[in-house]
Image (tube, grey):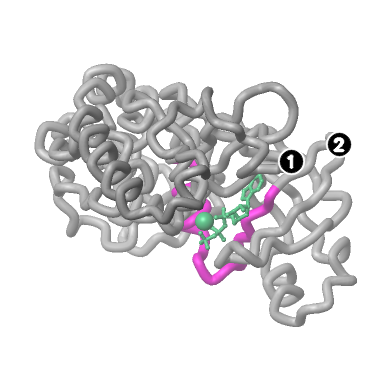
Amino acid sequence: MLRQVTATRYVTPLRSGGSVPGVVEADDEGTYVVKFTGSAQGRKALVAEVIVGELARALGLRFPELVLVGFDPAIAADEPHQEVRELHAASAGVNLGMDYLPGARDFSPEIAEVFDVHPVEAGRVVWLDALTVNVDRTVHSSNLMLWPTLGVAPPRLWLIDHGAALVFHHRWGTTDPAKAYDFRHHALGHYGPDVRAADAELRPKVTEELLRAITDEVPDAWLADEPGFGSPEEVRRAYVEFLHARVRASGDWLPTDFPSRDELAAENARRAARTRRDRPDWLKRVPDLHGKPAAEQDWSVHLG
Ligand SMILES: Nc1ncnc2c1ncn2[C@@H]1O[C@H](COP(=O)(O)OP(=O)(O)OP(=O)(O)O)[C@@H](O)[C@H]1O
Ligand SMILES: [Mg+2]
């Protein structure tokens, strides 16, 4: 089950997030990014965060710990913005916290230009997103972070923010579990994601038992009052049934026509040759980082 903590200090709102999550410290001495139940995205976004995030973890993808955070708006009484205070007031009680990764960087298009992601890792992420119909992992809104970015350990890719996944739960019963996934703008599409390898590796792991255990972690209060359902348990069953049907239909939605790594390398080489030819002499002295594996790149230039 998700651990429960109580927020003891409100640090700051994260205004870069559409739902204005808050950074808080808690009574276990941890620091968390809190997604509030009172946000415009609503409780379903939190349900998606729990189900998809815990699925990612169970499949071995890097995803920060989730906790349930008891939040008393009184600890954020100094918050100067009225709309943020209103969000807090509407969120008294249990909210969702994600372990805060200190110093993490958003995986932006600029970083994507110089950071190498292995096709197997990219394939796993795309596969998870296709399974959970996550429409919010695009080049410009990657919901991926690099961490750590200081010290000697190499930065790794971490998944965050699955609030926009499970789109089928906004219109229960109208989505075909075999529906194809639109992956054209996926944040990792340029890395030649090996989704076939991911499918072979991950599909057998997504069992009904796993899905049941994961949906059990969602608090009842976030599943209550769902129109058309008699109880939180019924809603959980609907998630399990849909995802289990979808995983069995992976042959129908598996996005497979990404360019291969070799095709991409050839394309990059062509582009680099064109750029070199067209570069003025003074620019030819500037090293070209494109196409180099991450290990050979000087990170401090881009992340310092
Ligand atoms: N665990 C974390 N550690 C460090 N920074 C984080 C973490 N989670 C989120 N952030 C930062 O906060 C930003 C907003 O977070 P997130 O995308 O989860 O919020 P959101 O309200 O769902 O945003 P949106 O709906 O706009 O995508 C991230 O882009 C990232 O910069
Ligand atoms: Mg986001």
- Above-or-below relation of 130 to 90: above
Point 24% across, 20% down: residue? 197
Q: 168 or 150: nearer the eye? A: 150
Q: Which residue is mark 2?
A: 29
Beta carbon of the mark 1 residue lies under 8 A of ligand 1 = yes
Quarter placement of the C terminus: top right
Task: Please identify the quarter of the rendering in which residue 140 is found.
Answer: bottom left
Task: Please identify the quarter of the rendering in which residue 10 is found.
Answer: bottom right
Beta carbon of the mark 2 residue lies under 8 A of ligand 1 = no
- Of marks 1 and 2, which one's residue comes earlier in the chain? 2
Point 87% across, 70% down: residue? 77
Q: Which residue is mark 1?
A: 102
Q: Nearer the observer, disc 1 or disc 2? A: 1
Q: Is residue 60 left or right of residue 133?
A: right
The three-letter amino acid code for the residue at tag 2 is: Glu
Q: 209 or 21: nearer the eye? A: 21
Quarter placement of the N terminus: top right
Does the magenta-highlighted stretch encompass residue 49?
yes
- Do labels 1 and 2 touch, CB within 8 Å? no
